[in-house]
């Protein structure tokens, strides 16, 4: 059988095939990387015209990672998909508390979703951090509330919960309220792998930028 075997060649070919589906969108090179990797992770070229970002959201995420920010996720699948070696090199970690016994107890007492209780438990640790929501609309709603009511100031919310109950609505709220820089996908599409692909793309952009500066003698 004749097929591409080299991992780098496979990736480059994938990006070449994806490019025509986003070349009609006005994007920076960094945004192209994020969009492309979201499409690559989903295998769905429709993503290109469903992705919504606030102005400079991609740059805000890159800068936050450059400062060693942490990432706080709603589910462990987001945490699993992020390149933690790359993140550690930058000085950051990924946190998820949805499975903590303490969170289960709080959620039961308050009659709320565990993902919502977990997001709330991060408190001021969310300041300057990246919030990644790939599964639970309740976590995204809580993140929005914390920004607006509690004065929390995350660097970026990657809010892309997947599903049919509350997912699309929570993302529309994120777009409408725009409480801080955000990246999302309209409708029911999304998921943990898509959130992880965004984080990994942001880190890729940062590493690529550092390499270019080094080559140019600016670092």
Image (cartoon, rainbow, N blue to C red):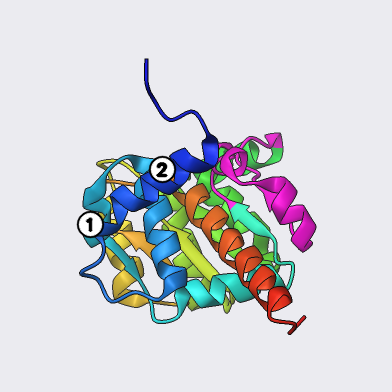
- Which residues lie in the magenta part? 73-101
Choose top left, top right, bottom left or bottom right for residue 78.
top right
Mark 1 near mark 2, Cβ–Cβ under 8 Å?
no
Q: Quadrant of the C terminus?
A: bottom right
In the displayed structure, 46 sits above or below 5; it is below
Query: Is 211 rendered above or below residue 75?
Result: below
Q: Nearer the viewer, residue 103 or 183?
A: 183
Q: Residue at x 47, y 70 (%)?
A: 30
Q: Is residue 154 above or below residue 164?
A: below
For label 1, the residue is 21
Circle 2 Cα neighbour tier, 10 Å, few/some/many (<14 / 14–19 / ≥20): some
Q: Is residue 15 located in the magenta-colored stretch of the structure?
A: no
Would you identify the image quadrant in which residue 63 lies? bottom right
Residue at the spot x=54%, y=77% of the render? 60
The percent coordinates of residue 161 (x first, y second) are 38, 48
Q: Is residue 89 magenta?
A: yes
Residue at 22 percent of width and 61 percent of height: 49
Residue located at (65% from left, 64% from top) = 207
Q: Residue furthest top?
A: 1
Determine which quarter of the picture holds residue 174.
bottom left
Q: Is residue 37 visible?
A: yes
- The local secondary structure at tag 2 comes to helix
User: How many marks overall?
Assistant: 2
Q: Quadrant of the N terminus?
A: top left
Q: CA distance from mark 1 to mark 2?
A: 15 Å
* Residue with the mark numbered 2: 41
Task: Indicate which label's residue lies in the foreground, 1 or 2.
Answer: 1
Where residue 55 sits in the image (x, y, percent)? Answer: 39, 81
User: In the drawing, does residue 62 fall left or right of residue 47?
Assistant: right
């Amino acid at each position: 059988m004749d097929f591409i075997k080299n991992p780098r060649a496979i990736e480059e070919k994938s990006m070449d095939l994806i490019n025509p589906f986003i070349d009609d969108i006005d994007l920076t090179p960094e945004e192209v990387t994020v969009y492309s990797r979201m499409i690559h992770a989903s295998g769905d070229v429709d993503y290109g015209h469903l992705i919504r970002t606030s102005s400079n959201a991609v740059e805000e995420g890159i800068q936050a990672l450059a400062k060693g920010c942490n990432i706080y996720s709603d589910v462990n699948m987001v945490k699993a998909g992020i390149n933690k070696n790359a993140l550690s090199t930058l000085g950051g970690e990924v946190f998820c508390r949805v499975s903590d016994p303490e969170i289960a107890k709080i959620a039961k007492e308050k009659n709320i979703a565990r993902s919502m209780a977990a997001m709330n438990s991060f408190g001021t640790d969310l300041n300057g951090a990246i919030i990644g929501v790939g599964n639970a609309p309740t976590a995204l709603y809580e993140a929005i509330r914390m920004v607006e009511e509690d004065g929390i100031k995350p660097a970026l919310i990657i809010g892309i919960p997947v599903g049919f109950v509350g997912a699309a609505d929570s993302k529309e709220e994120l777009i409408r309220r725009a409480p801080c820089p955000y990246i999302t996908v309209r409708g029911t599409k999304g998921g943990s792998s898509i959130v992880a692909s965004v984080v990994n793309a942001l880190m890729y952009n940062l590493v690529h930028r550092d390499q270019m500066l080094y080559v140019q003698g600016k670092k």
